[in-house]
Structure formats: structure tokens, C-alpha cells
Amino acid sequence: MFLNIFIGLKTHQVLELLRLRPDDSYCIFSGRTKPVTVEAVRLLLHFRYRTGNHAETDQQTAQGFLTFLRATKGSTASVNGVKLQPNDVLMWLTGSATMPAVGFHKVIDVEFGDTLRVNTCALVLTLAEVPREVEDVVQHYSELLINSQTFQAE
């Protein structure tokens, strides 16, 4: 295989990674980035539901978040004229608006608790139950994202 000429790529297992994921090597060497889609962000999420009394609430909360994520595909997720896209959600969750060519170091763990927290370094999202008075879950999460420190309107 032509990659054998790059002996220096054995450092940090780069050569092995390229052999395992040849489709990703194009992105690495071309400088192009993978498109950020709703499906790509969804595949990064690993939901960790609690058991017992919280199980049903956690599943409803997760469904609300996924509804918000799907809304970023179109123009539904907007607040005061600011339209959110999947790359905005990715930036909020990871600190990166693009998908790395070889992926993130792990999936994003979605946990459930009393307050919403996003840890971009550990790739952990803690979702709180959506208050009962919230009528539009897409609007709710859109406002949380837009008011976060990682959001920058263009």
C-alpha cells in the first residue's frame, strides 16, 4: 500500500489510524472538513439514562433535546432572527464548530441532573428537566445555546 512510504507516520499511531479509516485520510491531507449535519451530531451523543423514578423524565428530556437538534436542520431553531445550525450545536457541546477528520476522542456523554451543564473538555452534556411552563422545547434550547458563552452570532 502507498502509505508504507510514510514511515514517519508510525509516530502516535497515525499510520495505523489512516489504514483503519482510509476515507478520513482525504480530509486530513486535503485540509477539508467533514460537513456538520444533524445526523453526524446525533451519532456523537451517548445518552446515559438514570434508573428508577427518573427514567421516564430522562427519556422525555432526551426527546426534547433531540427535537431541538432536528430543528437545527431547517430554520425552526431561531431566536430573535438568529438561526441555529448543527455546527452551532456542535460548538456548544465540544468547543469546535467542525468535525475533526479522525473524529473526537470519545462520544459525548449525555447525562441527566438538576442543572444544565456543558463540559467541552470532557465531552459531557448534563441536561436538566425542561420546566413544565415551557411550551416550545426548541425555543427553550435555542435560547440556552444563544445565551451560552460559546455562541457567537455571525
Image (cartoon, helix red, strand yellow):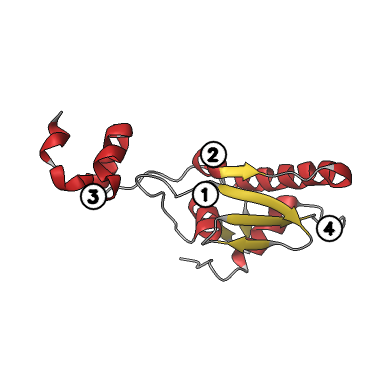
Type of amino acid at the residue the image marks with label 2:
Leu
Residue at mark 1 to residue at mark 4: CA–CA distance: 24 Å
* Disc 4 secondary structure class: loop
Q: Nearer the viewer, residue 121 or 28?
A: 121
Residue at mark 1 to residue at mark 3: CA–CA distance: 33 Å
Q: Which residue is mark 3?
A: 11
* Disc 1 secondary structure class: helix
The earlier-in-sequence mark between 4 and 2 is 2
Of the residues tagged 4 and 3, which is closer to the observer? 3
Q: Which residue is mark 2?
A: 43
Q: Residues within 10 Å of mark 4 (few under 14, many from 20)?
A: few
Using the image, tell me which numbered label, if any, was put on residue 130.
none
- 75 left or right, relative to 87: right
- Residue at 63% across / 55% down in the picture? 125
Q: Position of residue 129 (x, y in %)?
A: 80, 54
The earlier-in-sequence mark between 3 and 2 is 3
The earlier-in-sequence mark between 4 and 3 is 3
Using the image, tell me which numbered label, if any, was put on residue 86.
1
Of the residues tagged 1 and 3, which is closer to the observer? 3
Which image quarter holds the N terminus? top left
- Residue at 53% across / 44% down in the picture? 41
Q: Nearer the viewer, residue 116 or 150?
A: 116
Residue at mark 4 to residue at mark 2: CA–CA distance: 26 Å
Q: Are marks 4 and 2 in contact (CB under 8 Å)?
A: no
Using the image, tell me which numbered label, if any, was put on residue 131.
4
Of the residues tagged 2 and 1, which is closer to the observer? 2
Q: Position of residue 150 (x, y in %)?
A: 53, 67
> Which residue extends farthest top?
1
- Residue at 29% across / 45% down in the picture? 13
Type of amino acid at the residue the image marks with label 4:
Pro
Q: Position of residue 95 (x, y in %)?
A: 48, 61
